[in-house]
């Protein structure tokens, strides 16, 4: 008998705590300190709410048997655990999409060059289109839909071949990595054209690129996609992909939120006497003086 539910539960609790703190600080910083709460911030709150729902669903699944060997589960618990896995899968697709769109709009705040703006727009659009397609494939992968969680106990029904689902996951992971690296590299080109000291440019590039750090978890998750082809012992075999799905979204939300907290850190430095000013000044853009941005 094998049980990896404890690992899944530990990550669940860690990222529920970390993302809640990170998003709360982002809301406070953008809403009260900078007073520049934009569409990227609204989207990040939506992604956090969806991620919280994902974690709650995962927690329910753990109580039924997610992460455990089939031999340890009754038919009823196996069914319920598969149902919660199905729900988590849909929340995962939604969360990864909204996080990346939020990061894209975050970078659009500072993009000036029309080429950079269109690269960001196309990245956002492609992320949304693929995610919608993947979401609906996930919803209707079985006919009837309930065959997803009833199929192992044995009912009549049809599901998309496992190989097709695995290929879709591989494609999705590749596109997620491309989007992450686009959002990670592009800030260097965006910021370099702004008029600001070199040290400030480097700091801003690091902060903006930090939002794409989730690509590391995406690459690791890629390794475990093939476990989705497991049959009878599905809930135990897919423990790694469940863990890295949690890490991918959790790190994405956390990193993207931390990238917006420079004004808060500056205010804290002022309060403890490390700097002489606690006011956050908006940087004027060199080529568009009437437009301002905060990061």
Image: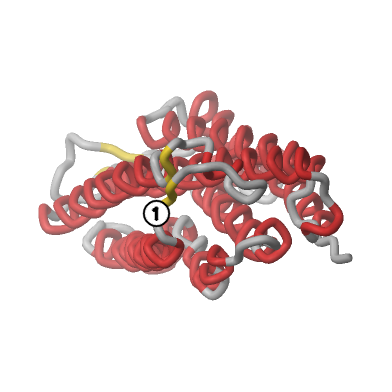
Q: Position of residue 89 (x, y in %)?
A: 53, 46
Residue displayed at 56% across by 57% down = 248
Residue displayed at 67% across by 47% down = 153
| Residue 195 seen by the camera | yes
Q: Which of the 4 quarters of the picture holds residue 79?
A: top right
Q: Residue furthest left?
A: 114
Q: Nearer the viewer, residue 29 or 286?
A: 29
| Residue 277 seen by the camera | no
Q: Nearer the viewer, residue 91 or 21?
A: 91
Q: Which of the 4 quarters of the picture holds residue 278?
A: top right
In the visual, does 227 lie left or right of 44? right
Residue displayed at 81% across by 61% down = 4
Q: Tell me the residue that label 1 is attached to.
A: 160
Q: Position of residue 148 (x, y in %)?
A: 53, 44
- For the C terminus, the quadrant is top left
Q: Is residue 35 above or below residue 283?
A: above
Q: Position of residue 202 (x, y in %)?
A: 42, 67
């Amino acid at each position: 008998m094998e049980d990896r539910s404890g690992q899944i539960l530990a990550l669940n609790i860690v990222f529920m705590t970390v993302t809640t703190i990170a998003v709360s600080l982002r809301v406070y910083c953008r809403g009260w300190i900078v007073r520049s709460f934009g569409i990227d911030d609204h989207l990040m709150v939506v992604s956090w709410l969806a991620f919280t729902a994902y974690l709650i669903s995962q927690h329910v699944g753990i109580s039924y048997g997610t992460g455990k060997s089939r031999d340890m589960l009754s038919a009823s618990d196996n069914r319920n655990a598969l149902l919660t896995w199905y729900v988590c899968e849909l929340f995962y697709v939604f969360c990864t999409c909204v996080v990346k769109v939020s990061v894209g709009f975050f970078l659009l705040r500072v993009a000036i060059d029309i080429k950079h703006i269109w690269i960001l727009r196309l990245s956002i659009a492609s992320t949304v289109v693929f995610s919608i397609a993947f979401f609906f494939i996930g919803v209707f992968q079985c006919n009837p839909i309930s065959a997803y969680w009833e199929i192992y106990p044995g009912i009549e029904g049809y599901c998309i071949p496992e190989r097709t689902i695995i290929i879709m996951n591989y494609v999705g992971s590749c596109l997620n990595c491309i989007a992450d690296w686009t959002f990670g590299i592009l800030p260097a080109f965006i910021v370099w054209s702004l008029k600001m000291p070199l040290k400030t440019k480097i700091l801003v590039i690091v902060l903006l690129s930090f939002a794409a750090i989730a690509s590391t978890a995406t690459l690791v998750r890629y390794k475990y996609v093939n476990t989705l082809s497991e049959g009878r012992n599905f809930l135990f075999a897919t423990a790694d992909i469940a863990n890295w799905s949690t890490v991918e979204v959790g790190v994405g939300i956390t990193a993207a939120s931390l990238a917006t907290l420079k004004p808060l850190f500056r205010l804290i430095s002022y309060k403890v006497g490390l700097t002489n000013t606690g006011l956050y000044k908006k940087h004027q853009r060199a080529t568009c003086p009437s437009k301002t941005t905060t990061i």
